[in-house]
Structures are given as structure tokens and as C-alpha cells.
Image (tube, rainbow, N blue to C red):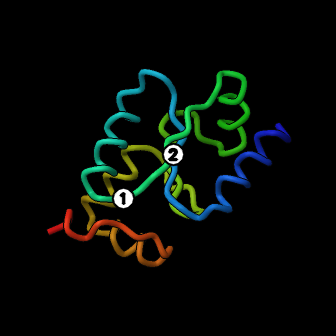
């Protein structure tokens, strides 16, 4: 568990957009497609099986993807879509200092 804590801290300290994924996850693929379409630069991190259980316990989230914006855990694809559909995503990105391709939002 300690290794998972250190790994998560390292990733969150980078203060960008990233998500944990697992192989053949349709919602992970949808998130990747949407982030790309919205011009948001991101990192996709596929967790090894040995790390999945510890990361799920640490975050207290047991489905994939696991999306972070800057240092804040957002949730999965459903929570991301709620931010988009509710018009909150761009404001949240700005608040966190995350740049994106504004031309993809016109």
C-alpha cells in the first residue's frame, strides 16, 4: 500500500490531467476520446494488476477510469461527463491552471 501512496503522490504533484486505466475498459477509451476531442492534454496510466487493488483501496474508488485534474480526484467517466454536460469543466480547468486547446471548444 505504501508504494501505491508514493506513486499517487508523485502523479498528483505533477498537477496535470491524468487517469488510471485498465486494459480493454470501454469507459477508459471513451474518456480518452473525449479528452482528446476537447483539446485537453492528459496522461493515461495503465495500472499493473498488482497495483490495481491497492490504488482502488487508497482512492476508495473501485471502477475505471480514475480521473484526476491537477491534484483532485474527479471520479470516473460518468463524473467527467456530468462536468462537461453541466458546463463546469472549462471553469474547473481554469481554476486548476490547466491549459487546453480553446479552438476545440468553439
Which image quarter holds the C terminus? bottom left
Q: CA distance from mark 2 to mark 1?
A: 12 Å
Which image quarter holds the N terminus? top right
Residue 10, how many percent across, how many down?
72, 54
Q: How many marks?
A: 2
SS category of the residue bearing label 1: loop
Which image quadrant for residue 103?
bottom left
Residue 66 vs residue 44, the one in the foreground: 44
Mark 2 or 1, nearer chain start: 2
The residue that appears at 50% across and 48% down in the rendered structure is 43
Give me the disc on residue 19.
2
Q: Say whether residue 50 is left or right of residue 97.
A: right
The residue that appears at 49% across and 42% down in the rendered structure is 44
Q: Say whether residue 68 is left or right of residue 10.
A: left
Q: Residues within 10 Å of mark 2 (few under 14, many from 20)?
A: many
Q: Residue furthest left?
A: 106
- Image height of 37 relative to 22, above or below: below
Residue 12, how many percent across, how many down?
65, 58
The residue that disc 1 covers is 40
Amino acid at each position: 500500500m505504501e508504494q501505491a501512496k508514493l506513486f499517487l503522490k508523485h502523479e498528483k504533484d505533477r498537477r496535470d490531467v491524468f487517469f488510471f486505466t485498465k486494459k480493454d475498459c470501454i469507459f477508459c477509451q471513451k474518456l480518452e476520446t473525449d479528452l482528446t476531442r476537447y483539446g485537453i492534454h492528459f496522461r493515461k496510466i495503465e495500472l499493473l494488476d498488482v497495483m490495481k487493488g491497492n490504488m482502488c483501496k487508497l482512492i476508495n474508488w473501485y471502477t475505471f477510469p480514475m480521473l484526476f485534474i491537477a491534484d483532485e480526484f474527479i471520479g470516473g467517466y460518468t463524473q467527467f461527463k456530468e462536468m462537461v454536460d453541466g458546463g463546469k469543466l472549462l471553469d474547473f480547468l481554469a481554476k486548476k491552471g490547466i491549459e487546453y486547446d480553446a479552438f476545440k471548444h468553439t
